[in-house]
Image: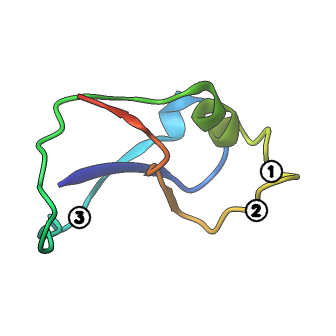
Amino acid sequence: MIRFGFDHYGDPTVLTALKAAVPLPKAGQVQLQVLGFGLNPYDASLRRGEQAAFRKLKWPIVQVLMSSAA
């Protein structure tokens, strides 16, 4: 599985592809293959550091904020 994350604030080039184990679904869950995802304006603001005064991050942050997937 590939996830995206960043370890410092900046423009879109700070996003890095990170390999991770594929989690196994638990009883009553399903596993989806995501072909694409989107980041919302808050995600971009967080990446740029505009939320740093309000939301402290533990580095590296893995981009799990994306709520739009296809």
**Contact check, label 2 and label 3, Cβ < 8 Å:** no
The image shows residue 23 at horizontal and vertical percentages of: 17, 68
Q: How is the image coloured?
A: rainbow
Q: Which residue is tagged 3? A: 20
Residue drawn at 52 percent across, 40 percent down: 14
Q: The disc labelled 1 sits on which kind of residue?
A: Ala
Foreground of the two, 34 or 46: 34
Q: Earlier in the sequence, mark 2 or mark 3?
A: 3
The image shows residue 17 at horizontal and vertical percentages of: 32, 47
**Contact check, label 1 and label 2, Cβ < 8 Å:** yes
Q: Is residue 63 left or right of residue 58?
A: left
The image shows residue 29 at horizontal and vertical percentages of: 16, 62
Q: Which residue is tagged 1? A: 52
Q: The disc labelled 2 sits on which kind of residue?
A: Lys
Say which element carries label 1.
Answer: loop
Residue drawn at 23 percent across, 64 percent down: 20
Residue drawn at 23 percent across, 50 percent down: 2
**Contact check, label 3 and label 1, Cβ < 8 Å:** no
Q: The disc labelled 3 sits on which kind of residue?
A: Ala
Where, quadrant-wise, is the N terminus in this rendering? bottom left
Q: Is residue 47 left or right of residue 19?
A: right
Q: Residue 43: which disc?
A: none
Sort mark 3 into few (<14), some (14-19) or many (20+) by Cα contacts within 10 Å: few
Q: Which residue is tagged 2? A: 56
Q: CA distance from mark 3 to mark 1?
A: 26 Å
Q: Is residue 44 left or right of residue 23?
A: right
Residue drawn at 40 percent across, 46 percent down: 16
Q: Residue furthest bottom?
A: 27
Q: Residue furthest front?
A: 28
